[in-house]
Image: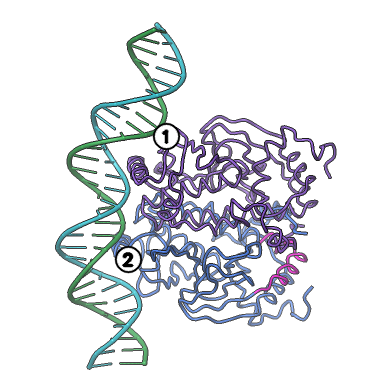
Chain colours: A purple, B blue, C cyan, D green
DNA sequence: CGCCGTGTTGACTATTCTCAACCCAGGTGG
DNA sequence: CCACCTGGGTTGAGAATAGTCAACACGGCG
């Protein structure tokens, strides 16, 4: 157990992990001690500039990275120069939780904006998860949601039209940002270039530009500079054929304090993939 | 520990799990006892016809399914009728290993051909993994590879041309089939319709037909009936821009008995994601 | 025999890409 | 302070890729 962190005093560390905690609490209730432990484990931070690789394909993975601030992505490149972005990492997201089973990275992770990240050593994660089973479960859940998002992106790129894809990407992004308290009303930051969007949706930059204009023209969103506003969330969701199931939230964003308790208690029993590595 | 299975007698059960064992041994060496235990755990089998749902989106997940024979897939459908296949499950594959953390399925799993599958109860998996750490690790590895394949598919659909996509799908499929001993020379079964390929690659059936003719016309493959032959594996791999890293095999298909031992020993230490659910 | 599921083809259309130019805002250096 | 440079964003025109629709071929199989 970690000593020396006051359970009620909110230090800089705890502010930094606030998104992570907020996210995990979509799944389970964390005790003050557990929150403090998370803050402690994520206290070794590092600042990076924009468009910088964090891990590169072919690397031997070393530590786990947790985004505290800024936006990063997972991507892969083809020998002919094309790039596909396969995930956005927002604050509270782990870049590569399961990395220790890999002998070699099969993809890269890079920042999009300036980023502050926490580096967590394998051993620290091991200690953490062996002592706090609720954290373990929550990390499991987070991992599962990441996979579900990847699958949804495959559906997105494979079977939605350009406009629908765009709507879906934006709506999903907004919902995820809201889940870590990084939205204000119907507004949040979306600090990506159109080229990055094109690498995400499998379109050309020109077509992204025109698609964006379409979505704007329908009165669904406003996107100027790096600021996104949903003018018509319902319309956007409909266009995107977005269904939130795959994000596996326990509650609607509005009713956090409602009758979650009942649903949560069902999850207090061990549900994680039952695999102990020793 | 499971009793009553003769470690050296090869029964029907062990033949059925042969692909699984063959696959897991890409990652680690299994003892006879471990193989027997796997056979035992997968002994509750079920036969299904073609094009039948195994699990449906929205279901509460109950048990884990392991494909013993035949071909299945993971898919999602859009309200407007489009379908995206997100994975092929060949013998030795688990459909939904991490299902116990889900309260509700976010995708469906269906057979493509007639299938024989094993149903594994949560508790059995728990017991298995708590007793056999090497199996646990191997399952972890298998899970990680599945995720890597999904990401590669996203790259495929997002950034490769129709011809390249087709080549990549076929080449990857062949490599996976070879890894479970279901190839003969450069030949294996590929029992899918062109419509199913179109739902996999995000193309129309007509375009799949023409793309297939292109690939045939280049002299790279033969595909008649449900039988696939790679006429020019090297050419196919090049066209597909296929790099096998993401499959995380420990060895090349040819040198199974070579100096794997050294590489394997590096992996004998615990490397799985260190999460115990209790 | 005839039906049905698949595969194949042609003709036409729609979507998306490419290329090239131009605009605009912010930052830098003279 | 301003001129210039640069990295996005925007636009137009034409080309390529992929989709749609409709017809037909082919091979089991009831």
Instruction: Quarter of the image for the N terminus of chain A: give it.
Output: top right
C21 or A264, nearer to the observer = A264
Residue at horizontal 61 percent and vertical 69 percent from the top: B61
Q: Decide: is A117 above or below A155.
A: above
Tell me where residue A40 sits by quadrant.
Answer: top right
- Image coordinates for residue B47, horizontal then vertical, percent: 55, 82
- The chain letter under disc 1 is A
Instruction: Quarter of the image for the C terminus of chain A: give it.
Output: bottom right
Give SS at disc 2.
helix
- Image coordinates for residue B124, horizontal then vertical, percent: 72, 72
A82 or B241, nearer to the observer = A82
The answer to whether residue A246 is left or right of residue B218 is right
Main secondary structure of the magenta stretch = helix
Magenta segment, which residues?
Answer: B120-138
Q: Decide: is C8 above or below A91.
A: below
Any mark on residue B205, and which? 2
Residue B128 counted in the magenta span: yes
Residue B10 counted in the magenta span: no
Please tell me how crowded label 2 is: few (under 14), some (14-19), or many (20+) other residues with Cα within 10 Å.
Answer: some
Residue at horizontal 72 percent and vertical 69 percent from the top: B34
Give SS at disc 1.
strand
A17 or B109, nearer to the observer = A17
Please tell me how crowded label 1 is: few (under 14), some (14-19), or many (20+) other residues with Cα within 10 Å.
Answer: few
Q: Decide: is B45 above or below B231.
A: below
- Image coordinates for residue B27, horizontal then vertical, percent: 64, 59
- The chain letter under disc 2 is B
Mark 1 highlights which residue?
A224
């Amino acid at each position: 157990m970690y000593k020396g962190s006051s359970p009620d005093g909110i230090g800089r560390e705890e502010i930094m992990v606030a998104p992570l905690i907020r996210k995990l609490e979509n799944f389970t209730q964390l005790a003050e001690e557990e929150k403090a432990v998370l803050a402690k484990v994520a206290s070794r931070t590092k600042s990076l500039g924009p468009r910088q690789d964090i891990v590169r394909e072919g690397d031997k993975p070393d530590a786990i990275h947790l985004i505290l601030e800024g936006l990063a992505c997972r991507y892969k490149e083809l020998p002919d120069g094309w790039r596909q972005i396969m995930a956005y990492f927002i604050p509270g997201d782990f870049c590569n939780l399961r990395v220790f089973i890999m002998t070699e990275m099969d993809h890269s992770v890079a920042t999009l904006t300036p980023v502050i990240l926490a580096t967590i050593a394998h051993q620290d994660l091991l200690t953490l998860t062996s002592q706090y089973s609720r954290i373990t479960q929550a990390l499991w859940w987070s991992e599962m949601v990441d996979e579900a998002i990847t699958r949804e992106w495959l559906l997105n790129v494979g079977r939605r039209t350009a406009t629908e894809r765009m709507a879906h990407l934006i709506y999903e992004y907004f919902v995820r940002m809201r889940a870590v308290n990084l939205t204000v009303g119907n507004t949040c930051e979306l600090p990506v270039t159109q080229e990055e969007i094109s690498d995400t949706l499998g379109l050309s930059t020109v077509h992204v530009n025109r698609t964006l204009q379409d979505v704007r023209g329908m009165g669904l969103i406003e996107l100027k500079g790096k600021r996104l506003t949903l003018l018509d969330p319902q319309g956007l969701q409909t266009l995107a054929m977005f269904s939130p199931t795959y994000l596996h939230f326990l509650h609607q964003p509005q009713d956090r304090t409602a009758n979650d308790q009942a649903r949560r208690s069902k999850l207090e029993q061990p549900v994680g993939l039952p695999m102990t590595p020793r």
